[in-house]
Image (cartoon, rainbow, N blue to C red):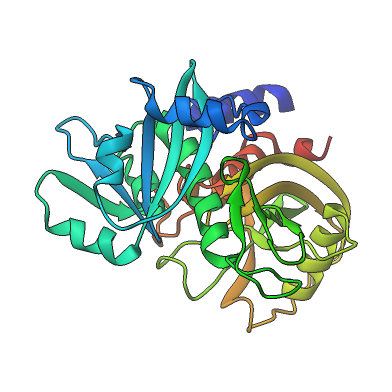
Amino acid sequence: MSQRGIDSDRRAEFGPKPALGYTPSPLERAADRRGDQAALIAFMAASDAGAYVVGGELIVAQKRAGGHDPLFGVKDAQALGALRETVFLGLADGAPRFGIGIDPEAAVALKARDDLFISDLRSIAIRGAVAPEHLPPIAEAKAILTWHARHRFCAVCGTATQLVDGGWRRDCPSCKTSHFPRTDPVVIMLAIHGGCCLLGRQSRFAPNMWSCLAGFVEPGESFEDAVRRETREEAGVTCGRVVYFASQPWPFPMSLMIGCHAQALTTELTIDHVELENARWFDREEAALMLRRSHPDGLETPPPVAIAHHIIRAWAEEGDGVLG
């Protein structure tokens, strides 16, 4: 059988590809309306306006038999607790969508209500507790509201800043500096060599879970160089060619995961045990068992909501073909 036939069979054995978590977003962000205060006021008052409610790490949803509903009417959302920032997220088929922040303590207190479902976003996504189309706007709301919670004062002069542009900027009234939301780029990569891939695990992972290596891109660094540096630092493996796979917003707290496959030039491991609990090479058959949750030792990859699952699956299906 040809290699193409083998890979086609392997793709079939995994079944349909699951959606990547927090993508794609159904919202038109309508950035041109953020600075139009009259438009924002009208959007808030619109009969079809909706809001997602975030209290620190917790998301608030309405309990429903077939899946919980995280989209509230604006006034209902505002009545749930002491308000923090409100941000304009965009338009869903013309209907305005907002993210409303409440005090984390208020979100915890709402757990006592029988009509509400309160949980962290990671658990909601893994469990499929809300319809998939809600995950991208919730991720957007959580990330931007987290940024506001951590950037209430000017980094230049220390003065309390003011929210403007529908929540997409904070201005300092003293030194006039404008502050914009930040996204932290993170490379997440699968090094491959001779029919094997390199996976690691951290102590905070679920038992038996192994995943791609990952790390933050440093200032003045390309993501290709970051892939090579992080793989070398964490596992002692030197990489050559790096191929981009896909990206994923990761609102924990406000990162962008840049998924890659990398050509490993060496295989000997020197593990940084400050960063990793362990790391080792896995062949394609073992990776396939982990993806299917049928490994004899109970080893697993991350769930489909995480980009690591998709990076590993692409290699399990296509082998070194992922490097082009």
Residue extending farthest bottom: 274
Task: Look at the image and tell me in which quarter the N terminus lies.
Answer: top right
Q: Is residue 43 above or below residue 220?
A: above
The mark total stands at 0
Which of these two is toward me, 98 or 217? Answer: 98
Task: Report whether 261 appears left or right of 105.
Answer: right
Residue 170: percent from left, percent from top:
64, 55
Residue extending farthest top: 93
Residue at horizontal 27 percent and vertical 34 percent from the top: 69
Task: Report whether 273 appears left or right of 288.
Answer: right
Residue 202: percent from left, percent from top:
54, 72
Task: Look at the image and tell me in which quarter the C terminus lies.
Answer: top right
Residue extending farthest front: 174
Task: Report whether 300 appears left or right of 127.
Answer: right
Residue at horizontal 57 percent and vertical 25 percent from the top: 9
Which of these two is toward me, 309 or 186? Answer: 186
Q: Quadrant of residue 198?
A: bottom right
Residue 22 shows in the view: no
Q: Is residue 173 above or below residue 244?
A: below
Residue at horizontal 66 percent and vertical 31 percent from the top: 31
Residue 74 shows in the view: yes
Which of these two is toward me, 301 or 176? Answer: 176
Q: Quadrant of residue 221?
A: bottom right
Residue 273: percent from left, percent from top:
63, 83
Q: Is residue 128 above or below residue 157?
A: above
Residue 189: percent from left, percent from top:
71, 54
